[in-house]
Amino acid sequence: MKSKIIFALCLLTGLMFINAGLDKFFHYMPIPENMPEKMAKAGMAFMEIGWLMPLVGAIEILGGSLLIFKRTRALGALVILPVLTGILLANISMAPSGLPIVFVLIAIVLWVIIDNRTKYLQIIK
């Protein structure tokens, strides 16, 4: 039962990150009208740096894809963790209304990390 729950959560989380990463390349999702001004300005500044958004998008696609499959889930959690940290910090400083979703994503990724802690310990040794 636990494995089915973690698979479903990782599948949804992975698909969310893949979708967000693909949007960084193809810009198919509309910008919300109620987005805080500070966040809109930060987004435009990031777009000015030509390589930053494609890099973040590629990491989101890679991390989300790795998170879906059990064999690569531990690596996917590590790949997506820095992006998730940036999302958390951006929401804390500019748009606190998005924090509940961020906390759910963090909880899922932390669950994956804790569930795969033996794999990480092998790297450290």
Image: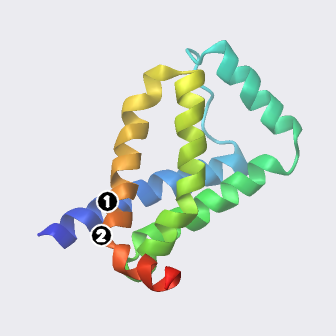
Q: Are marks 1 and 2 in contact (CB under 8 Å)?
A: yes
Judging by the rendered image, the residue that carries numbered circle 1 is 111
At mark 1, the secondary structure is helix
Badge 2, how many Cα within 10 Å: few under 14, some, many 20+? few
Q: What's under tag 1, amino acid-wise? A: Trp
Disc 1 from disc 2: Cα separation: 6 Å
Badge 1, how many Cα within 10 Å: few under 14, some, many 20+? some
Q: What's under tag 2, amino acid-wise? A: Asp
At mark 2, the secondary structure is helix
Judging by the rendered image, the residue that carries numbered circle 2 is 115
| Image coords of residue 6 (percent x, y) | 26, 64
The residue drawn where x is 64% and y is 47% is 23
Q: Nearer the viewer, residue 43 or 75?
A: 75
The residue drawn where x is 44% and y is 21% is 97
The residue drawn where x is 40% and y is 83% is 71
Query: In the displayed structure, would residue 102 be above or below residue 83?
Result: above
Query: In the displayed structure, would residue 4 be above or below residue 21?
Result: below
Q: Nearer the viewer, residue 115 or 10?
A: 115
